[in-house]
């Protein structure tokens, strides 16, 4: 299990009572369905570790599944002292078993301006992962060859006319390519990904069909 957070603006500087935003990724990098807890702690200057400011229990993950949350907004309360902080997300079995963690720094700036936030509230974020969408339509998706060098063809069926998106991610959960992001007709479709510019290793492709998301693993061997 792996977790990642990427702030939307760097450096992250915020006045007391303001907020900052980030994108989060939660990934099950095993062939076994898994449930995990996610919790967020904050290292406060002059105080130490504080939290959890948010906690989400028993998030279900399918095999090799990747879950994304975009534009999460973290409030910084007006009483937060100026200084350098660390924002930390853990996944595992709360509170003692930490499978993975991700963190970034932020600074509460000394200023006469005070925002409206009154507490460490998080909007969006990993809360949206607690009840991930369950596919309501069956979509067949596979790639061949697998393993491959250096190109593979991803085949899938689209159950009805609609927008389809196909993204490629590396083992760290970072998106490296978007192969499709447009309306496709119902039926069978295929697209080839050429990994000649990438190193050998494990990659994931994520197919989004309407509200349904399918993620599978592929191996590039050179």
Image: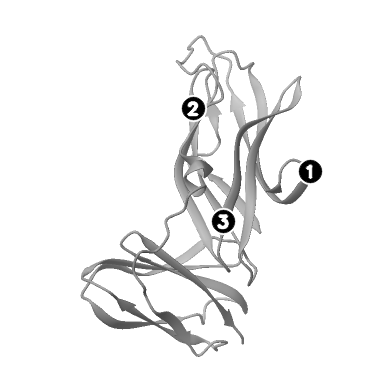
Give the CA separation, mark 1 to mark 2. 29 Å
Judge left or right: residue 80 versus residue 17.
Answer: right
The disc, 1 or 3, on the residue closer to the chain's N-terminal end is: 3
Q: Is residue 141 visible?
A: yes
In the figure, 208 relative to 83: above or below?
A: below
The disc, 1 or 2, on the residue closer to the chain's N-terminal end is: 2
Quadrant placement of the C terminus: bottom right
| Residue 138 lies in quadrant | bottom left
Most extreme residue toward the top, as rendered?
Answer: 112
Judge left or right: residue 49 versus residue 53.
Answer: right
**Disc 1 designates what residue?**
96
Quadrant placement of the N terminus: bottom right
**Disc 2 designates what residue?**
19
Whether the residues at callouts 1 and 2 have beta carbons within 8 Å, the answer is no
Give the secondary structure at mark 1: loop
The disc, 2 or 3, on the residue closer to the chain's N-terminal end is: 2
Number of residues whose C-alpha sits closer than 10 Å to that of mark 1, classed few (under 14), some (14–19) or many (20 or more): few
Q: Position of residue 40 (x, y in %)?
A: 63, 37
**Disc 3 designates what residue?**
60
Front one among 70 and 66: 66
Give the CA separation, mark 2 to mark 3. 29 Å
Residue displayed at 57% across by 87% down: 147
Q: Position of residue 23 (x, y in %)?
A: 50, 46
| Residue 44 lies in quadrant | top right
Number of residues whose C-alpha sits closer than 10 Å to that of mark 3, classed few (under 14), some (14–19) or many (20 or more): some
Judge left or right: residue 207 versus residue 188.
Answer: right
Q: Position of residue 79 (x, y in %)?
A: 59, 13
Q: Position of residue 75 (x, y in %)?
A: 51, 26
Whether the residues at callouts 1 and 3 have beta carbons within 8 Å, the answer is no
Residue displayed at 45% across by 82% down: 142
């Amino acid at each position: 299990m792996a977790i990642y957070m990427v702030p939307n603006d760097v450096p992250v500087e915020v006045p007391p009572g303001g907020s900052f935003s980030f994108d989060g990724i939660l990934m099950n990098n095993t062939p076994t369905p898994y449930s995990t807890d996610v919790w967020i702690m904050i290292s406060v200057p002059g105080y130490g570790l504080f939290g959890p400011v948010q906690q989400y229990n028993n998030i279900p993950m399918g095999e090799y599944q990747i879950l994304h949350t975009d534009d999460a907004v973290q409030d910084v309360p007006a009483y937060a002292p100026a200084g350098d902080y660390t924002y930390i997300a853990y996944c595992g079995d709360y509170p003692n078993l930490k499978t993975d963690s991700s963190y970034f720094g932020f600074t509460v700036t000394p200023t006469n301006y005070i925002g409206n936030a009154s507490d460490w509230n998080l909007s969006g974020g990993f809360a949206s992962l607690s009840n991930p969408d369950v596919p309501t339509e069956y979509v067949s998706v596979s790639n061949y060859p697998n393993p491959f060098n250096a190109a593979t063809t991803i085949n899938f069926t689209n159950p009805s006319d609609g927008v389809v998106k196909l993204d490629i991610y590396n083992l760290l959960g970072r998106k490296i390519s978007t192969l499709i992001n447009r309306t496709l007709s119902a039926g069978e479709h295929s697209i080839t990904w050429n990994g000649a510019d990438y190193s050998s290793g494990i990659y994931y492709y994520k197919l989004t069909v309407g509200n349904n998301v399918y993620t599978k693993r592929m191996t590039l061997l050179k």
